[in-house]
Image (cartoon, helix red, strand yellow):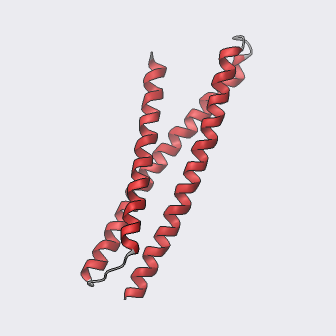
Amino acid sequence: MEAQVRSSIEEELRKLRRDFEKAVDTVENLKKITNELERRLTLEEPEEAQTDSSSLESALNSIEELTDSEILGSKAAWKEYNELKHECQQHDLKIEQLDELEILCKRKEQFAADLLCYSLGRLKQKSK
C-alpha cells in the first residue's frame, strides 16, 4: 500500500511541477508580448494602432484564460493533495513527499491568486 501511495504522490508532484513551469513560461511570453504591444501603441498613430490593439486584446484574453485555468488547476491540486493526505493518515504512512506536494499546491494557489490580481488590476485600469 505504501508503494502505491508513494507512487501516486510522486506522479502528482511531477504533474504539478510540469504544469507550473509551463504556466510560468506562458505568462512570461504573454507579458513580453503585452509590454511590447503597449509600448508600440503609445508610439503609433491611431490608424496604425488597430492591428496592435487587436493583438493586445488577444494577449490579455489569453492571460485571463490562463488565470481561469490556474484557479481550477489549483483547486484540483488541493483536492488530490487532501485525498492523498487522507490515505496516508488512514494507513498511518509517513511519506516525506507529501510535504513537498503541499508546498507545490501552495505555490500553484499563490500563482493563481497573483494572476487574478493582475487580471483584476487590468480590468480596473481598462474601466477608467
- In this rendering, is residue 29 above or below 60? below
Residue 39, position in %: x, y?
Answer: 66, 22
Tell me the quarter of the picture where residue 40 sits. top right
In which quadrant of the rendered view does residue 35 lie?
top right
Left or right side of 90 for 115? right
Residue closer to the observer: 30 or 79: 30
Q: Position of residue 38 (x, y in %)?
A: 63, 24
Q: Nearer the viewer, residue 55 or 14?
A: 14
Location of residue 127 in the rendering, given as x and y in whole percent from the top left corner: 45, 19
Q: Is residue 104 above or below residue 71?
A: below
Residue at 56% over, 62% down: 18
| Rendered-image quadrant of the C terminus | top left
The location of residue 44, given as percent across then percent down, is 72, 14
Name the residue: 42% across, 87% down: 3
Q: Which residue occupies 42% across, 31% down?
A: 120
Q: Viewed as shown, does residue 28 lie left or right of 107?
A: right
116 lies above or below 21:
above
Tell me: residue 107, above or below residue 101: above
